[in-house]
Image (cartoon, rainbow, N blue to C red):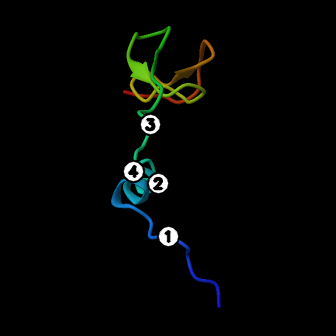
Amino acid sequence: MAVPARRTSKTRKNKRRSSVWKLDAPTLVKCPNCSEYTVPHRVCPSCGYYNGKEVIDVD
């Protein structure tokens, strides 16, 4: 049976585990129609425009 030759130190263990839970902040761009921040390549939820055209009617 394989056994580790040396004990894994707390620092090495914590370095390995530290970056797993971190999440990146979502990228936001300004809508060219209404200047609200939206996720890129999605219909703007505040005005309903995408690529200069009205896709959904938001009232």
Give the label, 1 or 3, closer to the camera: 1
Query: Residue 27 at what x, y percent from top left?
Result: 48, 26
Give the SS element for disc 4: helix
User: In the rendered structure, which disc, 1 or 2, sits on the residue that comes first in sequence?
Assistant: 1
The residue identified by callout 2 is 16
Give the SS element for disc 2: helix
Label 1 CA crowd tier, 10 Å (few <14, some 14–19, many 20+):
few
Q: Mark 2 is on which residue type? A: Arg
Which image quarter: residue 30? top left
Label pair 2/4, CB-CB below 8 angstroms? yes
Residue 46 position (above or below residue 18): above
Label 4 CA crowd tier, 10 Å (few <14, some 14–19, many 20+):
few
**Label 4 – label 3 distance at C-alpha:** 14 Å
User: In the rendered structure, which disc, 1 or 3, sits on the residue that comes first in sequence?
Assistant: 1
**Label 1 – label 3 distance at C-alpha:** 34 Å
Give the label, 4 or 3, closer to the camera: 4
How many numbered marks are there?
4
The residue identified by callout 3 is 24
Q: Mark 1 is on which residue type? A: Arg
Query: Residue 33 at what x, y percent from top left?
Result: 48, 9
Residue at horizontal 60 percent and vertical 12 percent from the top: 52
Residue at horizontal 42 percent and vertical 50 percent from the top: 15
The residue identified by callout 4 is 18
